[in-house]
Image (cartoon, rainbow, N blue to C red):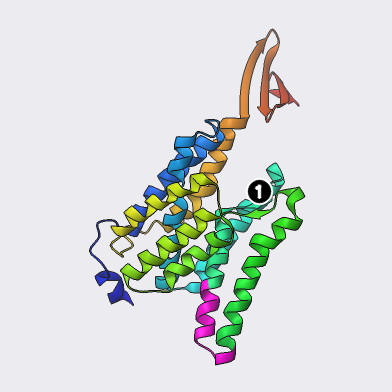
Amino acid sequence: MSNLRTTENKGIFSGNMLKIFALVCMTIDHIGLYLMENSYPMRAIGRLAFPIFAYMIAEGCKYTHNRTRYFYTIFIMGLAFQTVCILADDNYHMNIFITFSLSILLIYSLDYGRNNSETVQWQFPILAVLFVLFVSEIMPMFLGDINYGIDYGFFGIVLPLMVYLFDKKELKLIMFTVGLILLCLTRDAIQWWSMFAVIPIVFYNGKRGKLKIKYFFYGYYPLHIVAIQLIKHFKIKFMEVHNGTILLCCWKNQWWLWFSKKNRYWG
Protein backbone atom coordinates (compact mmCIF):
# COMPACT_ATOMS: atom_id res chain seq x y z
CA MET A 1 0.00 0.00 0.00
CA SER A 2 2.75 2.47 0.87
CA ASN A 3 4.60 1.60 -2.37
CA LEU A 4 1.46 2.38 -4.33
CA ARG A 5 1.30 5.77 -2.74
CA THR A 6 4.84 6.77 -3.66
CA THR A 7 4.84 5.40 -7.22
CA GLU A 8 1.25 6.12 -8.22
CA ASN A 9 2.12 9.32 -10.08
CA LYS A 10 4.66 12.08 -10.40
CA GLY A 11 2.53 15.14 -9.71
CA ILE A 12 3.73 18.33 -8.06
CA PHE A 13 1.05 18.82 -5.40
CA SER A 14 1.07 16.95 -2.08
CA GLY A 15 -2.09 16.23 -0.15
CA ASN A 16 -1.31 19.06 2.26
CA MET A 17 -0.90 21.51 -0.61
CA LEU A 18 -4.24 20.50 -2.10
CA LYS A 19 -5.96 20.84 1.27
CA ILE A 20 -4.51 24.31 1.82
CA PHE A 21 -5.69 25.32 -1.65
CA ALA A 22 -9.15 23.96 -0.79
CA LEU A 23 -9.15 25.88 2.50
CA VAL A 24 -8.41 29.11 0.65
CA CYS A 25 -11.25 28.43 -1.82
CA MET A 26 -13.60 27.57 1.04
CA THR A 27 -12.72 30.74 2.95
CA ILE A 28 -13.32 32.88 -0.15
CA ASP A 29 -16.64 31.10 -0.61
CA HIS A 30 -17.82 31.77 2.94
CA ILE A 31 -16.68 35.40 2.87
CA GLY A 32 -18.67 35.81 -0.33
CA LEU A 33 -21.70 34.12 1.24
CA TYR A 34 -21.79 35.86 4.61
CA LEU A 35 -20.01 39.18 4.13
CA MET A 36 -20.30 40.06 0.43
CA GLU A 37 -24.02 39.54 -0.21
CA ASN A 38 -23.62 36.15 -1.85
CA SER A 39 -20.97 37.30 -4.34
CA TYR A 40 -21.18 35.02 -7.39
CA PRO A 41 -17.45 35.08 -8.32
CA MET A 42 -16.44 34.24 -4.75
CA ARG A 43 -19.06 31.49 -4.48
CA ALA A 44 -17.87 30.07 -7.82
CA ILE A 45 -14.28 29.87 -6.54
CA GLY A 46 -15.60 28.15 -3.44
CA ARG A 47 -17.08 25.32 -5.51
CA LEU A 48 -13.58 23.88 -5.90
CA ALA A 49 -13.18 23.19 -2.18
CA PHE A 50 -15.60 20.32 -1.59
CA PRO A 51 -14.41 18.03 -4.43
CA ILE A 52 -10.78 18.37 -3.35
CA PHE A 53 -11.66 17.57 0.26
CA ALA A 54 -13.75 14.61 -0.94
CA TYR A 55 -10.79 13.21 -2.89
CA MET A 56 -8.58 13.62 0.19
CA ILE A 57 -11.14 11.80 2.34
CA ALA A 58 -10.88 8.82 -0.01
CA GLU A 59 -7.08 8.96 0.30
CA GLY A 60 -7.34 9.22 4.07
CA CYS A 61 -9.52 6.11 4.27
CA LYS A 62 -7.04 4.21 2.13
CA TYR A 63 -3.86 5.14 3.98
CA THR A 64 -4.84 5.92 7.58
CA HIS A 65 -3.12 3.85 10.25
CA ASN A 66 -6.17 3.88 12.52
CA ARG A 67 -9.48 3.72 10.66
CA THR A 68 -11.62 3.89 13.80
CA ARG A 69 -9.90 7.02 15.06
CA TYR A 70 -10.08 8.58 11.59
CA PHE A 71 -13.85 8.14 11.50
CA TYR A 72 -14.51 9.27 15.07
CA THR A 73 -12.27 12.34 14.75
CA ILE A 74 -14.27 13.65 11.80
CA PHE A 75 -17.63 12.54 13.21
CA ILE A 76 -17.07 14.10 16.65
CA MET A 77 -15.85 17.35 15.05
CA GLY A 78 -19.02 17.43 12.98
CA LEU A 79 -21.26 16.61 15.93
CA ALA A 80 -19.66 19.23 18.17
CA PHE A 81 -19.82 21.97 15.54
CA GLN A 82 -23.40 21.08 14.62
CA THR A 83 -24.43 21.28 18.27
CA VAL A 84 -23.04 24.81 18.43
CA CYS A 85 -24.91 25.73 15.22
CA ILE A 86 -28.19 24.41 16.60
CA LEU A 87 -27.83 26.15 19.96
CA ALA A 88 -26.56 29.46 18.57
CA ASP A 89 -28.55 29.78 15.36
CA ASP A 90 -31.18 27.00 15.33
CA ASN A 91 -29.38 25.63 12.26
CA TYR A 92 -30.14 21.97 11.48
CA HIS A 93 -28.41 21.85 8.10
CA MET A 94 -25.65 19.31 8.70
CA ASN A 95 -22.09 20.55 8.21
CA ILE A 96 -19.42 19.12 5.92
CA PHE A 97 -17.91 16.93 8.66
CA ILE A 98 -21.22 15.05 8.90
CA THR A 99 -21.23 14.60 5.11
CA PHE A 100 -17.73 13.10 5.19
CA SER A 101 -18.56 10.96 8.22
CA LEU A 102 -21.27 9.31 6.13
CA SER A 103 -18.79 8.95 3.26
CA ILE A 104 -16.36 7.11 5.53
CA LEU A 105 -19.19 4.95 6.86
CA LEU A 106 -20.01 3.92 3.28
CA ILE A 107 -16.38 3.10 2.52
CA TYR A 108 -15.92 1.05 5.69
CA SER A 109 -19.18 -0.79 5.01
CA LEU A 110 -17.94 -1.75 1.56
CA ASP A 111 -14.66 -3.04 2.97
CA TYR A 112 -16.48 -4.95 5.71
CA GLY A 113 -18.63 -6.65 3.09
CA ARG A 114 -15.60 -7.52 0.95
CA ASN A 115 -13.91 -9.26 3.87
CA ASN A 116 -16.88 -11.42 4.91
CA SER A 117 -19.19 -14.07 3.50
CA GLU A 118 -20.96 -13.65 0.17
CA THR A 119 -24.25 -12.87 1.94
CA VAL A 120 -22.71 -10.10 4.06
CA GLN A 121 -20.63 -8.97 1.09
CA TRP A 122 -23.75 -7.64 -0.61
CA GLN A 123 -26.17 -7.01 2.23
CA PHE A 124 -23.99 -4.78 4.40
CA PRO A 125 -22.98 -2.24 1.71
CA ILE A 126 -26.55 -2.14 0.36
CA LEU A 127 -27.91 -1.39 3.84
CA ALA A 128 -25.31 1.35 4.25
CA VAL A 129 -26.30 2.93 0.91
CA LEU A 130 -30.00 2.78 1.85
CA PHE A 131 -29.25 4.40 5.22
CA VAL A 132 -27.27 7.21 3.58
CA LEU A 133 -30.01 7.69 0.98
CA PHE A 134 -32.59 7.92 3.76
CA VAL A 135 -30.79 10.52 5.91
CA SER A 136 -29.62 12.63 2.95
CA GLU A 137 -32.62 12.64 0.60
CA ILE A 138 -35.73 11.28 2.34
CA MET A 139 -35.47 12.82 5.81
CA PRO A 140 -35.20 16.40 4.43
CA MET A 141 -38.64 15.90 2.82
CA PHE A 142 -40.18 15.41 6.26
CA LEU A 143 -38.03 17.88 8.19
CA GLY A 144 -38.27 20.87 5.89
CA ASP A 145 -39.73 23.01 8.67
CA ILE A 146 -36.41 23.00 10.54
CA ASN A 147 -34.29 23.26 7.35
CA TYR A 148 -32.68 19.85 7.94
CA GLY A 149 -30.34 18.65 5.23
CA ILE A 150 -26.98 17.03 4.52
CA ASP A 151 -24.43 19.31 2.89
CA TYR A 152 -24.04 18.31 -0.80
CA GLY A 153 -26.62 15.55 -0.46
CA PHE A 154 -26.38 11.91 -1.52
CA PHE A 155 -23.95 12.35 -4.39
CA GLY A 156 -21.68 14.46 -2.21
CA ILE A 157 -21.52 11.58 0.26
CA VAL A 158 -20.88 9.03 -2.49
CA LEU A 159 -18.09 11.02 -4.21
CA PRO A 160 -15.23 9.83 -1.93
CA LEU A 161 -16.44 6.24 -2.34
CA MET A 162 -16.19 6.50 -6.13
CA VAL A 163 -12.55 7.55 -5.80
CA TYR A 164 -11.78 4.93 -3.14
CA LEU A 165 -12.91 2.02 -5.30
CA PHE A 166 -9.82 2.19 -7.52
CA ASP A 167 -6.05 2.27 -7.05
CA LYS A 168 -4.84 3.46 -10.45
CA LYS A 169 -4.86 7.23 -10.76
CA GLU A 170 -6.38 7.21 -14.23
CA LEU A 171 -9.41 5.26 -13.00
CA LYS A 172 -9.66 7.47 -9.91
CA LEU A 173 -9.78 10.57 -12.10
CA ILE A 174 -12.44 9.07 -14.36
CA MET A 175 -14.66 8.13 -11.41
CA PHE A 176 -13.96 11.45 -9.70
CA THR A 177 -15.09 13.28 -12.84
CA VAL A 178 -18.20 11.10 -13.20
CA GLY A 179 -19.03 11.67 -9.52
CA LEU A 180 -18.63 15.42 -9.95
CA ILE A 181 -20.95 15.43 -12.96
CA LEU A 182 -23.61 13.55 -10.97
CA LEU A 183 -23.19 16.02 -8.11
CA CYS A 184 -23.50 19.03 -10.43
CA LEU A 185 -26.62 17.61 -12.06
CA THR A 186 -28.36 17.53 -8.68
CA ARG A 187 -27.24 20.96 -7.43
CA ASP A 188 -27.60 24.58 -8.50
CA ALA A 189 -25.97 25.68 -11.75
CA ILE A 190 -23.08 27.35 -9.92
CA GLN A 191 -21.91 23.89 -8.82
CA TRP A 192 -20.54 23.26 -12.33
CA TRP A 193 -17.56 25.42 -11.38
CA SER A 194 -16.47 22.50 -9.20
CA MET A 195 -15.41 20.65 -12.36
CA PHE A 196 -12.27 22.79 -12.33
CA ALA A 197 -11.23 20.85 -9.21
CA VAL A 198 -10.15 18.05 -11.53
CA ILE A 199 -7.16 20.17 -12.65
CA PRO A 200 -5.27 20.31 -9.31
CA ILE A 201 -6.16 16.67 -8.65
CA VAL A 202 -4.44 15.71 -11.93
CA PHE A 203 -1.20 17.09 -10.46
CA TYR A 204 -1.57 15.30 -7.09
CA ASN A 205 1.57 13.27 -6.36
CA GLY A 206 -0.06 10.74 -4.02
CA LYS A 207 1.95 11.90 -1.00
CA ARG A 208 0.71 13.52 2.19
CA GLY A 209 3.42 16.13 2.51
CA LYS A 210 6.23 16.63 4.99
CA LEU A 211 4.32 18.43 7.74
CA LYS A 212 1.83 16.65 10.01
CA ILE A 213 -0.88 19.30 10.22
CA LYS A 214 -4.08 17.28 10.01
CA TYR A 215 -5.51 18.81 13.20
CA PHE A 216 -5.03 22.27 11.70
CA PHE A 217 -7.34 21.23 8.86
CA TYR A 218 -9.89 19.82 11.32
CA GLY A 219 -9.89 22.96 13.44
CA TYR A 220 -9.81 25.55 10.68
CA TYR A 221 -13.34 24.90 9.44
CA PRO A 222 -15.28 25.70 12.64
CA LEU A 223 -12.88 28.48 13.66
CA HIS A 224 -13.13 30.39 10.39
CA ILE A 225 -16.93 30.08 10.42
CA VAL A 226 -17.03 31.50 13.95
CA ALA A 227 -14.68 34.35 12.95
CA ILE A 228 -16.82 35.26 9.92
CA GLN A 229 -20.02 35.17 11.97
CA LEU A 230 -18.47 37.43 14.59
CA ILE A 231 -17.42 39.91 11.91
CA LYS A 232 -20.92 39.83 10.42
CA HIS A 233 -23.09 39.98 13.52
CA PHE A 234 -21.09 41.30 16.47
CA LYS A 235 -20.82 45.05 17.02
CA ILE A 236 -19.42 46.90 20.00
CA LYS A 237 -19.51 50.55 21.02
CA PHE A 238 -18.15 52.51 23.95
CA MET A 239 -19.90 55.66 25.18
CA GLU A 240 -18.28 57.92 27.73
CA VAL A 241 -20.67 59.57 30.20
CA HIS A 242 -19.96 61.93 33.07
CA ASN A 243 -19.92 59.23 35.74
CA GLY A 244 -18.55 56.21 33.88
CA THR A 245 -18.48 54.25 30.62
CA ILE A 246 -21.32 52.54 28.78
CA LEU A 247 -20.47 49.47 26.75
CA LEU A 248 -22.95 48.53 24.04
CA CYS A 249 -22.76 45.10 22.42
CA CYS A 250 -24.91 43.95 19.52
CA TRP A 251 -25.46 40.40 18.24
CA LYS A 252 -27.89 39.99 15.34
CA ASN A 253 -29.60 43.33 16.03
CA GLN A 254 -30.04 42.60 19.74
CA TRP A 255 -28.26 45.09 21.96
CA TRP A 256 -26.89 44.57 25.46
CA LEU A 257 -25.74 47.35 27.73
CA TRP A 258 -23.13 47.37 30.48
CA PHE A 259 -22.39 50.37 32.67
CA SER A 260 -19.05 50.79 34.43
CA LYS A 261 -18.53 53.03 37.45
CA LYS A 262 -15.50 52.68 39.69
CA ASN A 263 -14.84 49.09 38.52
CA ARG A 264 -18.42 48.02 39.23
CA TYR A 265 -20.53 46.60 36.44
CA TRP A 266 -24.26 46.23 35.92
CA GLY A 267 -25.92 44.47 32.98
Q: Indicate whether 157 appears above or below 248.
A: below
10 or 207, which lies in front? 10
The residue that disc 1 covers is: 84
159 or 10, which lies in front? 159
Q: Residue at x 39, y 71 (%)?
A: 63
Q: Indicate whether 70 appears above or below 77.
A: below
Q: Residue at x 53, y 89 (%)?
A: 116
Q: Where does the N terminus fall, quadrant-wise?
A: bottom left
Q: Residue 114 magenta-drawn? A: yes
In the rendered structure, the answer to whether residue 45 lies left or right of residue 86 reads left
Q: Position of residue 208 (x, y in %)?
A: 33, 62
65 or 263, which lies in front? 65
Q: Position of residue 179 (x, y in %)?
A: 46, 62
Residue 15 location, quadrant:
bottom left
Q: Position of residue 59 (x, y in %)?
A: 40, 67
Q: Residue furthest left?
A: 10
Residue 174 location, quadrant:
bottom left
Q: Indicate whether 169 appears above or below 28.
A: below
What is the span of residues highlighted in magenta in the rendered image? 107-119
Q: Indicate whether 53 appears above or below 40.
A: below
Q: Residue at x 63, y 17 (%)?
A: 238
Amino acid, disc 1 = Val
Local packing at callout 1 (Cα closer than 10 Å; few below 14, some 14-19, many 20+) is few
